[in-house]
Image (tube, grey):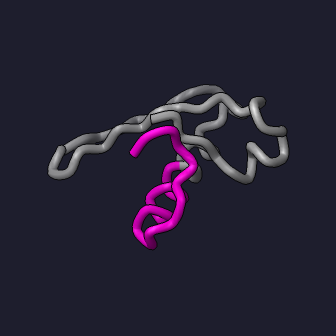
Amino acid sequence: MGGRHPVVERQLGIGSFVANDLTIYPGDNRFCLITGPNMAGKSTFLRQNALIVLLAQIGRFRPCLHG
């Protein structure tokens, strides 16, 4: 989907943030285990997707390519 974190992207400059994907289907029983070394961006990824969900719920623009 090409999700982006708008705050981080603004600080880095447009084009510097690498968009990433998270696909969630309704009714799908999924468990996501996000691992990696410290400073790998795990919390940024989680916050980014939580922000996109909140924006979608209130009917606002979502910082992603599709969806």
**Number of numbered labels in the structure image:** 0
Q: Nearer the viewer, residue 50 or 57?
A: 57
Which residue lies at the image location 64% right of the left edge and 27% below the top edge? 37
Is residue 66 within the magenta segment?
A: yes
Q: Nearer the viewer, residue 48 or 56?
A: 56
Residue 38 sits in quarter: top right
For the view shown, which residue lies furthest in the left direction? 27
The correct choice, above or below, for 1 with respect to 59 in the image is above
39 horizontally vs 67: left or right: right
Question: Is residue 59 shown left or right of residue 17?
Answer: left
| Quarter of the image where the N terminus is located | top left
Q: Is residue 18 left or right of residue 64?
A: right
> What residue is drawn where x is 40% and y is 68%?
57
Left or right of 58? Residue 38 is right
Question: Looking at the image, which residue is at 29% across and 40% down?
Answer: 31
Magenta range:
49-67
Viewer-proximal residue among 60 and 52: 60
Q: Residue furthest bottom?
A: 58
Whole-percent x, y for residue 52 in the image:
50, 55
At 43% from the left and 40% from the top, the residue drawn is 66
| Image location of residue 39, percent across then percent down | 72, 33
Q: Does 9 lie within the magenta span?
A: no
Image spot of residue 9 (x, y percent) = 74, 43
